[in-house]
Amino acid sequence: MDLAAELRHIPDFPKEGIDFIDITTVLKDKELFRETIDQMAALVEDLDFDLIIGSESRGFILGAPLAYATGRGFAPVRKKGKLPFRTVQATYSLEYGSDTLEMHIDAVQPGQKVLVVDDLLATGGTALANCQMVEALGGEVAGVLFFIELTDLKGKDKLSRYQLRSLVKI
């Protein structure tokens, strides 16, 4: 199945010059969504990990079913101020600004092996912030997995010390 062909491109969103890749075309189709999760699970079957974390919102959408499919737990990463318990946080830059992410301080246990999952690798800032929070809590980043990698933006360079996998490269 050619998942890349099923993605919708929206030019100049959220601002001029950004080519937004819309994954809702895949998510709404039960066969494509299942195939996406199955292929992502296959990409990490050789990695040793205990937990998946995913950033809101599309990291939730892919990370939670991937956790279910691989028999692991899932912990959410949210934007600043959205989690009810004490948090660790990391600020990051992205291709159109900056933001702060947070994760509960008990989401990752010391020594726990964590797979960081998100929908898109662009500049690598979001994923790096996730990795930094995992490590700040004493966890080990077992790998970083993306549905889509925008290769021209070279986000993987920021993540070169981690096992990086991506399903679709554009």
Image (tube, grey):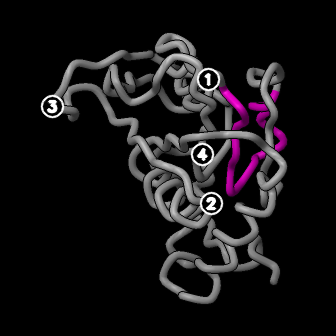
Quadrant holding the N terminus: bottom right
Q: Quick one: label 1 or label 2, which is nearer the N terminus?
A: 2
Which amino acid lies under the numbered mark 4 shown in the image of this protein?
Answer: Val
Q: Quick one: label 2 or label 3, which is nearer the N terminus?
A: 2
Spatial CA span between label 4 and label 2: 13 Å
Query: Which mark is nearer the camera, 4 or 2?
Result: 2
Density class for disc 3 (Cα within 10 Å; few <14, some 14-19, many ≥20) is few
Spatial CA span between label 1 and label 3: 23 Å
Tell me the element at label 3.
loop
Which amino acid lies under the numbered mark 1 shown in the image of this protein?
Answer: Leu
Q: Are marks 3 and 4 in contact (CB under 8 Å)?
A: no
Residue highlighted by disc 3: 84
Query: Which mark is nearer the camera, 1 or 2?
Result: 2
Query: Which mark is nearer the camera, 1 or 3?
Result: 3
Image check: 131 left or right of 44?
A: left
Quadrant holding the C terminus: bottom right
Which amino acid lies under the numbered mark 3 shown in the image of this protein?
Answer: Pro
* Residue drawn at the location 63% of the way across and 48% of the way down: 120
The percent position of residue 21, horizontal first and vertical second, equals 60, 60
Tell me the element at label 2.
helix
Name the mark on residue 70.
2
Residue highlighted by disc 1: 128
Q: Are marks 1 and 2 in contact (CB under 8 Å)?
A: no
Name the mark on residue 117.
4
Q: Quick one: label 1 or label 3, which is nearer the N terminus?
A: 3
Spatial CA span between label 3 and label 4: 22 Å
Queried whether the magenta region covers residue 145, the answer comes back as yes
Q: Does residue 170 show up?
A: no
Spatial CA span between label 2 and label 3: 27 Å
User: Camera-side residue: 76 or 23?
Assistant: 76
* Range drawn in magenta: 141-156
Q: Are marks 1 and 3 in contact (CB under 8 Å)?
A: no
